[in-house]
């Protein structure tokens, strides 16, 4: 048997063991839980030993068998060495291209309006933006650095806090000035609420319910409205007077400054625990292009405080 045949199965096994769940491993690997389970079964069939047992009745948590637990440190060390080897190969063929992963909304609303300053400072670096909304594997997908939004913990990545954020309602000036007027949160019941599905699909991300509960309006219904699976499109719909959006402060900063959006309820706001982070593989921290882009992002964010 050729060992490379089983690399994907080993990745699935290691992720499932770390999360104690096929479902959570599947999210990390960007595959289905069934695919993770199939890979683990392939590995078990080849090895001739079971790798997991159920924790107890009534739970879906997986527990590695004694044999599996004993093997995991060597498997993880092997993946670390593979990662280092591939990184050295990539370093040896450095083409001057820096591949950056960001969300489509972050690219459109924050990065692209500012990117010329980085290009002027580093004309020797060509940028390639990856705005795919799926979760990416930095090593497998050739990603150098990225900006992610969340709680600051992503397996295998160093995360440097970039910007904190708060949320508040935003709409177009013309919608604000319509009758009946938007003067207090209760008026939202008469307007279309714009919902960002890219956030609602992730547990812990802010929603209209988050804001209104925190502001003391638990009785206001938030189920109605228009749902869009693209954060930039949600804000464009608000600019076009299609409804009231839940604005994330860093994403709407430029639109507010330009007058394309307004805050109809003044200072009504809700701080949140999530933030933007610059992320990269720890073994790449000293790479000049990655370090330069990270430092530029941090400096740009600092200019807005």
Image (tube, grey):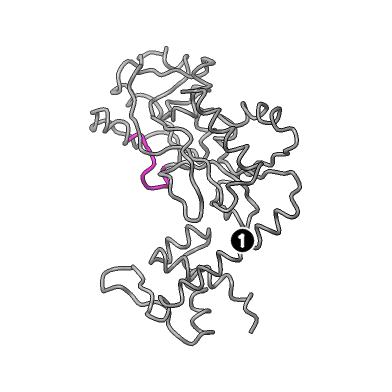
Total numbered labels: 1
Point out residue 54 in the picture as x, y percentages from the top left corner.
33, 75
Rendered residue at 53%/32% (across/down) = 298
197 and 49: which is toward the camera = 49
Point out residue 183 in the picture as x, y percentages from the top left corner.
32, 15
Tell me if residue 203 is in the magenta stretch: yes
Rendered residue at 50%/42% (across/down) = 148
Q: Indicate whether 156 appears above or below 234.
A: below
The stretch of residues the image draws in magenta is 200-209
Point out residue 209 in the picture as x, y percentages from the top left corner.
31, 36
Rendered residue at 37%/47% (across/down) = 203
Rendered residue at 42%/60% (across/down) = 24
Choose top left, top right, bottom left or bottom right for residue 1.
Answer: bottom right
Main SS of the magenta part reads loop
Choose top left, top right, bottom left or bottom right for residue 89.
Answer: bottom right
**Extreme residue in the bottom direction:** 48
256 and 282: which is toward the camera = 282
Q: Indicate whether 16 appears above or below 30.
A: below
* Left or right: 57, with 260 as reference point: left
Q: Which residue is mark 1?
A: 84
Packing grade of label 1 (10 A; few <14, some 14-19, many >=20) is some
Choose top left, top right, bottom left or bottom right for residue 96.
Answer: top right
Tell me if residue 38 is in the magenta stretch: no
Point out residue 299 in the picture as x, y percentages from the top left corner.
55, 29
């Amino acid at each position: 048997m050729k060992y490379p045949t089983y690399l994907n199965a080993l990745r699935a096994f290691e992720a499932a063991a770390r999360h104690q769940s096929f479902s959570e491993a599947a999210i990390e690997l960007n595959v289905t839980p069934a695919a993770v389970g199939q890979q683990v079964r392939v590995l078990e069939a080849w090895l001739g030993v079971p790798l997991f047992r159920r924790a107890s009745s009534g739970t879906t948590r997986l527990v590695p068998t004694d044999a599996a637990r004993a093997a995991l440190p060597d498997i993880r060390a092997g993946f670390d060495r593979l990662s280092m080897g591939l990184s050295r190969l990539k370093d040896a063929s450095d083409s001057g291209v820096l591949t950056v992963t960001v969300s489509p909304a972050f690219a459109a609303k924050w990065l692209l309006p500012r990117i010329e300053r980085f290009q002027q400072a580093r004309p020797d670096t060509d940028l390639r933006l990856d705005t795919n909304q799926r979760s990416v594997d930095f090593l497998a997908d050739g990603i150098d650095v990225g900006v992610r939004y969340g709680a600051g913990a992503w397996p295998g990545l160093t995360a440097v806090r970039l910007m904190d954020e708060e949320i508040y309602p935003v709409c177009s000036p013309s919608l604000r000035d319509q009758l009946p007027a938007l003067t207090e949160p209760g008026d939202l019941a008469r307007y279309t609420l714009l919902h960002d599905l890219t956030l609602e699909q992730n547990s812990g991300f802010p929603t209209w319910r988050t804001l209104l509960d925190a502001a003391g309006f638990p009785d206001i219904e938030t189920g109605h409205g228009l749902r869009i699976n693209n954060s930039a499109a949600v804000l464009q719909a608000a600019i076009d007077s299609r409804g009231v959006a839940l604005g994330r402060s860093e994403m709407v900063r430029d639109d507010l400054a330009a007058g394309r959006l307004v805050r109809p309820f003044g200072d009504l706001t809700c701080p949140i625990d999530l933030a933007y982070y610059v992320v990269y593989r720890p073994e790449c921290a000293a790479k000049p292009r990655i370090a330069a882009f990270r430092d530029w992002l941090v400096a740009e964010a600092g200019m807005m405080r």
